[in-house]
Amino acid sequence: MHNRLLLQNIITHIEENLTEKLTLEVLAGRFGVSEIYIRKLFKSAFHMPISTYIKKRKLSCSAALMLECDFRIADIAAEYGYEFPQTYINAFKREYGLTPFQWKKSGQPLTITEKVSLDEMIAIGEEGMILPDLLILPAMILSGVKHRLGFTESHSLAPQKALEFWDDDYPKIKHVQEKAVYYGVTKNYDQEKRSSDYYCTAHVSAPNEGRQNLLIGSSRYARFTYIGSHSYRELDVKRAKEMYRAIEIYFARQSDNQHMFDQDMYFERVDTKVCTEDFCTMEWYIPYK
C-alpha cells in the first residue's frame, strides 16, 4: 500500500474508532504493516507521535460531547476508553490546564486538536509525497564543507557530495548538536554564472576550526517534508527533480506566487536515525515571508 493511501486509511480509521481502543498494535494488525513503520510514517508526515495525536483527538471529541449533552464525567470517560473517571480528568487537565468541571464553569475557549489532513499533500511519483507547513526555527550553527555547483549539475552533484561528506567528513565534525542528522545548504545564487554554493554540514554547538561554518539566523520557513519508500542513499537526480517540481507547484498556488529560486538560501535536513532501507524522510526549509 502506498504511503499516502496508508496514511489516509489510518486517519480515517482513527476518526471512525475514537471511542475504541486504538494502539499501534491494533493499527499495525489492521493495515498489515509494522508498528515501527506506522510510528515513523505518521510522525514524519505530521511531526507528532501517533499516540499523542490519538490522545488529543479523544480529548477534543470528548470536550465537544460535554457541550452537546448533559453527560456525567464518568460516562464520557467510559465512552472514550478511560477505565476510571479520575484518569480521564487528569488527562484532560494535563492537556488543557483545567479539569472538565473547571472548564465548563469558566466558559473559557478550548484549543482543540482537529483531524489532520492530507489536502495540501503533493504526490511525488508513485510512492513519494510532500507535505508542506509553516514554522519558525531558532538560529543555529552549521559546520562542514562548501562546493560551487552549476544550476544544471546541482541535481546530480548535490546528492553525490552529500553522501561523500556523510561517509568521509561527518565523523570528523566536532561539537555535533544533532547526532546522525545531515544539513545541506544552498545559498549565494549567481544568476550570471548560473551557479550557487552548496554546503554539506552538521548542526553544531560551536564552530569547527578549518571547516566552513554558517550561522543560520532565526526565521519563518516553509517546511516541505518528503516521504519515500527507499533508503536515504537513493535520493537521486530523478527524485530531486520531482521534489523541486513539487515545491514549485506549492509556491505557484500561493497568492503572492513566490518562486522558490527567488530565495537567497534554503536547506534540506535528513535524520538518518529515522530512515531505513525502505523508508526515507527529508525536510526542505525555505525562508518564507
Image (cartoon, helix red, strand yellow):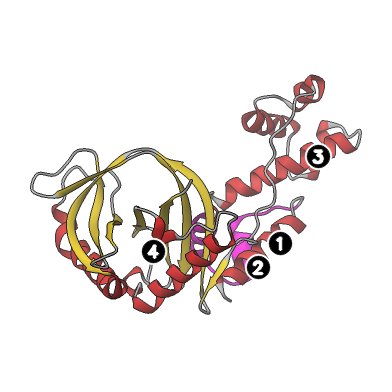
Amino acid residing under circle 3: Ala
Residue picked out by circle 2:
30
Q: Alpha carbon of mark 3 to alpha carbon of mark 4: how far?
A: 38 Å
- For the point 18% across and 62% down, which residue is it? 147
Instruction: Please determine whether, in this image, residue 285 is positioned above or below residue 2.
Output: above
Q: Are marks 3 and 2 in contact (CB under 8 Å)?
A: no
* CA–CA distance in space, label 1 to label 4: 25 Å
What residue range appears in magenta?
20-44
The residue at which mark 1 appears reads as 13
What's the amino acid at mark 2?
Arg
Residue drawn where x is 40% and y is 74% of the image: 241
x, y percentage for residue 156? 28, 75
Res. 275 mark: 4
Q: Secondary structure at mark 3?
A: helix
> Which label number is shown at residue 64?
3
Nearest the eye: 179 or 269? 269
Give the mark nearest the N terminus, 1 or 2.
Answer: 1
State whether residue 170 appears in this view.
yes
Q: Indicate the secondary structure of the residue bearing disc 4.
A: loop
Q: Of the two numbered discs 3 and 4 on the same chain, state the one appearing first in sequence.
A: 3
Question: Within the magenta stretch, is there residue 254?
Answer: no
* Image point (36%, 55%), residue name: 266
Q: Quadrant of residue 61?
A: top right
Dot 2 alpha-carbon crowd within 10 angstroms: few under 14, some 14 to 19, many 20 or more: few
